[in-house]
Amino acid sequence: MLAKLIAFDLRTYRKMLWKPLLICLGIFLIATVTTRYVEGITIFIAIMALIVAAGFIVYTMVSHYYRHFYTHQGYLTHTLPTTPSQKLWAKFISGFILHVLAIVGVGLGLYLLFYVSFRDLMHSKFFMDMIKGFFDAIGPATVWVFVISLFLAYISFFATYSLSISVGMNKFLQRFGGGGIALAFVGIYLVQQLVNLVNFFTPLSVRIFLNPRWHQMIQVVNEQPFGSMSILAESDDLVPEIAYMDVGVLAIVYSIVFVIFSFLWVRREIKLINLR
């Protein structure tokens, strides 16, 4: 049943997105092709087309989640023999698939735009040596950190908008309609900013080394999460083998607690929904 729910969500995404994405793709390709003849404005138009396409994808994810659980459009799936956890996991997995496709699409679009606009530079020996030196410097660990960060960013995004909708549609805020969801989102955002502020001044961080030394990749240090990064930025003799980044322990703990709380709260609220 979970697979059927995921397939249903993906079909819905396709129906909602193919027209606006096709328009954005057409504008992007036209702007990209003419970049070699009219620079500046065409690059701006191409980048704006990618941004608008990404905005449509985000809107589709959030609006489909809301319509599926809180409007008549979700009546059919509400009558299926599924559990609230299955419905929630279906939204999470289908949204993640769309998230990955969006990242790949935007990445390919930026590569194509850069290739067409700076073709001579990309074929030069200087550029190839610079790219090779960059990947040799960051090491495979940095690539994995980037990939994991994209996955964690989606988890945080899903937890935020699902909790905002669930809190905004409860019996206390439902009377405000969409304003209740907006109030819930603003409340969550303010709490996150307060945690980030406290985390900024807390001298306890997780240090992640951006090199291939897997046995010594993570350490807990008594330093502010951004203080060490400013020191590294000012250093002139930094070598790739000792490059690292610090993440506040408080921010990590809050993120874990927030995701768990969001999942439990949303699942509880989904149980109470009755569209029959």
Image: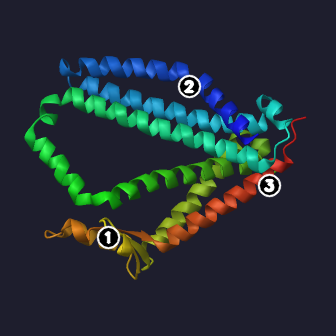
Image position, residue 31 (x, y; %): 30, 20
**Circle 3 — which element?**
helix
Percent position (x, y) of residue 122? 16, 35
Where the C terminus falls, by quadrant? top right
Counting every numbered tag in the picture gives 3
Q: Position of residue 55 (x, y in %)?
A: 50, 34
Instruction: Tell me the amino acid under the disc marked 1.
Output: Arg
Label 2 and label 1: CA atoms lie apart by 43 Å
Name the residue rendered at 21%, 53% in the picture.
134
Q: Is residue 88 above or below residue 232?
A: above
Q: Is residue 171 left or right of residue 19?
A: right
Q: Which residue is mark 3?
A: 268
Q: Secondary structure at mark 1?
A: loop
Spot occupied by residue 6 in the image (x, y as percentages of width and height): 67, 37
What residue do we see at 40% from left, 83% from top? 222
The residue where tag 1 is placed is: 213
* 216 shown above or below 35: below
Would you identify the image quadrant in which residue 82 lies?
top right
- Which numbered mark, 3 or 1, is in the foreground of this view? 1
> Badge 2 local density, few (<14 within 10 Å), some, or many (20+)?
some
For the residues carrying marks 2 and 1, which lies nearer the camera in this image? 1
Q: Amino acid at mark 3?
A: Arg
Foreground residue among 68 and 146: 146
